[in-house]
Image: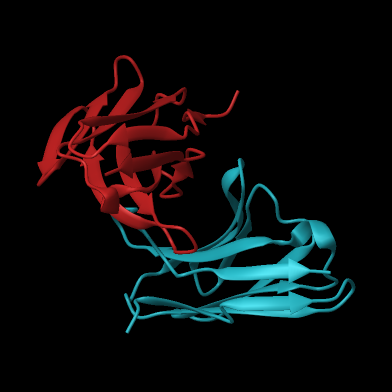
Chain colours: A red, B cyan
Amino acid sequence: QKEVEQDPGPLSVPEGAIVSLNCTYSNSAFQYFMWYRQYSRKGPELLMYTYSSGNKEDGRFTAQVDKSSKYISLFIRDSQPSDSATYLCAMRGGSYIPTFGRGTSLIVHP
Amino acid sequence: DADVTQTPRNRITKTGKRIMLECSQTKGHDRMYWYRQDPGLGLRLIYYSFDVKDINKGEISDGYSVSRQAQAKFSLSLESAIPNQTALYFCATSGLTGEAFFGQGTRLTVV
């Protein structure tokens, strides 16, 4: 079992939908949680960075961490075709080396 | 200008050839990483370096070597390229908070 599990999708939604992307993990030492967006043939770019449990909001994006369940989520409100990309979760403990999920492919169709 | 720059962006090489991928960063970070990305397998860590004198193997270092020439420069070498090293390669850096910043990637094809 990988330390970080993420459904590869693809997840296809209509424009304007609320999108929920999720990851589970097994390492209880993870304390820092990140979400990256990767467009085709581009490098991953950092979207959200959170520490420990709770919610963090940035515009249409909300990151949620539930450490008791070892479960993290990224919500995208009012999804747009430009949100179509692969979303990778990442997390780390004290080692500073992030462990990545495999990524979920999101398609937002007009 | 990009914070993390990788060269070349695309490369086709023959089996058995030596090839070097280069990475430079302007973020002033000490930590640098090399990943490869394959469809369905996500990002896998090849090597990482926490400072100029520190080099560590990642989960898939066999067939690769690295050199940290300066705080801002970290290169990856394939001594004798083989077809299953065909992949998308990413360099990344991180600071004290651990947020990783990636380059645009090098698409390597070994024929």
Task: Residue B34 in the image: state x and y as whole percent.
Answer: 56, 63
The quarter in which the C terminus of chain A is drawn is: top left
- Viewer-closest of A109 and B39: A109
Q: In this view, does B71 lie above or below A51?
A: below
Name of the residue lying farthest toward the top: A69
Kindly indicate the quadrant of the structure image that contains residue A55.
Answer: top left
Which picture quadrant has residue B30? bottom left
Say if residue A91 shows up in the picture: no
Residue drawn at x 56%, y 77% as measured from the top left: B9
- Across the whole image, how many numbered discs are drawn on residues? 0
Left or right for B75, reference A44: right
The answer to whether residue B5 is seen in the rendering is yes
Q: Residue at 68% of width from left, 78% of height from top? A: B11
Above/below status of B5 relative to A13: below
Which x, y percent locates residue A109? 32, 42
Q: In this view, does A74 lie above or below A59?
A: above
| Residue B47: percent from left, percent from top | 61, 60
Work out whether residue B83 or residue B62 is closer to the camera in this orientation and state it. Answer: B83
The image quadrant where one finds the N terminus of chain A is top right
Instruction: Give me the residue at 32% from left, 75% from top.
Output: B27
Point 52% across, 68% down: residue: B105
| Residue A67 rendering spot, x and y as whole percentages | 29, 22
Give the residue furthest to the front: A110
Asked whether A12 or A101 is in front, the reply is A12
